[in-house]
Image (cartoon, coloured by chain):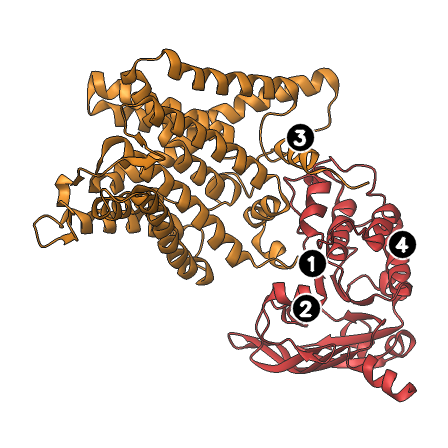
Chain colours: A red, B orange
Amino acid sequence: MATERESDSRAFLQVENLTKSFGGIRAVDHVNLNLSKGELRCLIGPNGAGKSTLFSLLSGLQKPEAGRILFKGEDITSLPPFRRVQKGVCQKFQTTRIYRGLTLSQNLLIARRVHDGIENGRLNWALKTLGLDGQPERLAGELPHSHQQWLEICMALATEPDLLLLDEPTAGMTPEETALTAEFAIQLNAQGMTILVVEHDMGFVRQIARFVTVLHYGRIFAEGTLEEIESNQNVRRIYLGEQ
Amino acid sequence: MKESKISKIWRKLNGPQELGHGPIFWSLFGCFAVVLLGYSLVGSVFSLSNLAIFFAYVPMGLGLGLLWGYGGVLSFGQAAFFGIAGYVYGIVAGNLMGTPGGTLLAAVCGIGGTMVVAAAFGYFVFYGQVSGWIIPLLTLVLSLIIETFMGQTAGYQWRLGRVLFGGYNGMTNIPSLSLGGVEFTGATVAFYVLVIAVTLAVYLGLRLLVNSRYGHAVAAVREDAERTRMLGYNVDFIQVQVFTLAAGLAGLSGVLYVSWGNYMNPSSMGMVAATLPVIWTAVGGRNSLLAVLLSTVALRWLADALAVRGGEYAFLILGALLLATMLFFPAGIVVSVARRWRDGKRRDSKIPPAPLQETNQTRGVS
C-alpha cells in the first residue's frame, strides 16, 4: 500500500530528457526532474541557466525538441497551454502579467474556473491572506507592485491547479512583503498544493524550501536538501559567488 | 440565495464593460427607443426609408466594435462579409422567388454562408498565429479580392439558376425580405420598424455578451493573449468565434441592405466600403457599443448629407474626421466625452474608478 502511494506521488510530475535550444544555444539540456505530490521545490541557478525556459516548457508556451513531460502519469508534452491548465498546471510569469486595465474582480472573474454556485475556498483564503479581498473595483494596474504579484498568484489559484509554477514571485518586493509571500507559500503547500518555484532571492528560498534543484547551463547541476545545496562547494562557486 | 434570471440579466446589462448604467441611462435609452419606433407613426416614408438604411449598418459597426474594441483585432473584412451575405441572399431569394419562406431561407443562407467563410478564414489566420498587424491587411485583401472577382462577373455565363451576378452593374431585382405576408421593402414603415428592432436587439444582446464571463475572456485576449492562454482559455478558438460573430453581424447588415434596395454591387466591398466601418468605430470609440451605434448612424447621416451637397468631398471630410479623432480623441469622441463626464462625477462623489480605461495594450491597434 505504502509502495503504491509512493509510486503515485513520484509520478506527479516527471520530466524526462527535456531539451530546448535557441539557435546554437541549448537553454535546456536533457533535464530530468521528478516532483512528488505536495512537494514545495525551489529551482535556482545563475542568470541564463534555463530556469524560465524550463517553466515555459512545463506550461506549454514553448515546445521541446526532445524529451517528455508526464503529469499525474499522463504525457502532456504535446498539449497546448490551455489544455495543461485544464489538467491542473498553472504558471505565474516572471514579469507580472495581469489585466492592468481591468478591475481586480474582473481579473479574478476571467481567471476563475466555473462551477455553478460553488465557492473556491482556497482562492478566498488566498485573497484574504494577501490583503486583496477589500478592493474588488480597484483597477489592477493601480495596485502596488507586490499586490500585482499576489493578484497574479491568486489568478493562478483561481484556475484550481494541482501544480503551481511560480517564476520569481518576490521580485521587487520589500523584505516584509517577501516574508508574507514565503509564509503564504508555506501555508498553501501545507494545504496540499504542489509548488515549483524559480527564485533568485536566497533569503526567500531559505524560508520556504525543503528541497532544491540547481540548474546550470541548462543542465541539472545539483539536487538536494537546502542544507546539502548550501554546503555544496561547486554550487557555492557557480551560484553563490564564492571562490 | 440563488440569483434570479431577471436580476442576472439586469446585472449583465449594467456590467462594467460598456458605457451607460443606472436609472437615468436606461430611462434615456427607453425614450430613445420609443422616439425611434414612434417616429414610424409620424415620419414620411422617404425619411423613414433614409433613417432605416442608416440604422441597417449598425450591426456591421457593432460587429467591428466587438472584434476591434473588445477583441483587439482590427479588420477591414466587414465589407467583404456584408457583400457575401448580400450576394448569397440575392442568389437564394432570386431563385426561390414566389416560394413561401424563400426570403427567410435566403437570409439564413446569407448570414450563415458569410459566417462559414469567416470561420474558415479566421481558422487559418488565428490558428496560424498571424500577427496582429498583418490581420488588417489580410482582411482588406479579402474584401478587395471579392470585389474584383464579383466585378468581372458580367455576362450571361455568370449566373446561378435564374440570377445573374451582373459584374460591376451589380445584382438587381433582389426580392425584399417577406415574413408572415409582410414585405419589408425599403420604402415601407415595416422595414423601418424591423431595422430599429433588430438594431436595438443586437445592441442589447452584445451588451449582455460583453459583460458575461465570455465577454471578459474576449477582453482578456485583447489585453494579454498569452496570460489568457495560461488561465486555461483556447485563445485561438475565441478569436475565431468573435471574428465569425462580427462577420455574421456584417452579414445581417448586408441582408437588410439588399432587402432595402433590392440591389447589391461589388463596390459594397471596395476600398471605401471596407474603410467606413473602421471610421464609424474609431470616431465613436471602439471600446463602447453605444458609441459605435451612435457614430455609425451619425456618420452615415453625415456622409449622406455631404453626398447630396458635395459628392466626392464626403469621403475626404470623413477621412479628415478620422484623422482629427485619432489626434485629439484617440479613444473616440463619445467615449472621451463619457469619460470626462464620469471623471467629473467621480471627483464630486468620490466614486471608485470605473474599468473602461485605455491601457498600453488597448491604445492604438492591438
- Chain ID of residue with mark 1: A
- In which quarter of the view is residue A86 placed? bottom right
Q: Nearer the viewer, mark 2 or mark 3?
A: 3
Could you tell which of marks 2 and 4 lies nearer the N-terminus? 2
- Marks 2 and 4 sit apart, C-alpha to C-alpha, by 24 Å
What residue would you read off at disc 2? A55
Could you tell which of marks 1 and 2 lies nearer the N-terminus? 2
- In which quarter of the view is residue A167 placed? bottom right
Same chain under badges 2 and 3? The reply is no
Same chain under badges 3 and 4? The reply is no
- For disc 4, the neighbor class at 10 Å (few under 14, some 14 to 19, many from 20) is some
Q: Nearer the viewer, mark 1 or mark 3?
A: 3
What residue would you read off at disc 4? A179
Same chain under badges 1 and 4? The reply is yes
What residue would you read off at disc 3? B354
Q: Amino acid at mark 1?
A: Gln
Q: Amino acid at mark 4?
A: Ala
Figure check: A107 above or below B340: below
What residue would you read off at disc 1? A94
Q: Are marks 2 and 3 in contact (CB under 8 Å)?
A: no
Q: Secondary structure at mark 3?
A: loop
Q: Amino acid at mark 3?
A: Ala
Q: Secondary structure at mark 4?
A: helix
Measured from the top left, where is residue A163 in percent x and y? 76, 67
- Marks 3 and 4 sit apart, C-alpha to C-alpha, by 33 Å
Measured from the top left, where is residue B163 in percent x and y? 16, 47
Figure check: B228 above or below B308: below
Q: Are marks 1 and 2 in contact (CB under 8 Å)?
A: yes
- Marks 2 and 3 sit apart, C-alpha to C-alpha, by 35 Å
Q: Are marks 2 and 4 in contact (CB under 8 Å)?
A: no
- Marks 1 and 3 sit apart, C-alpha to C-alpha, by 28 Å
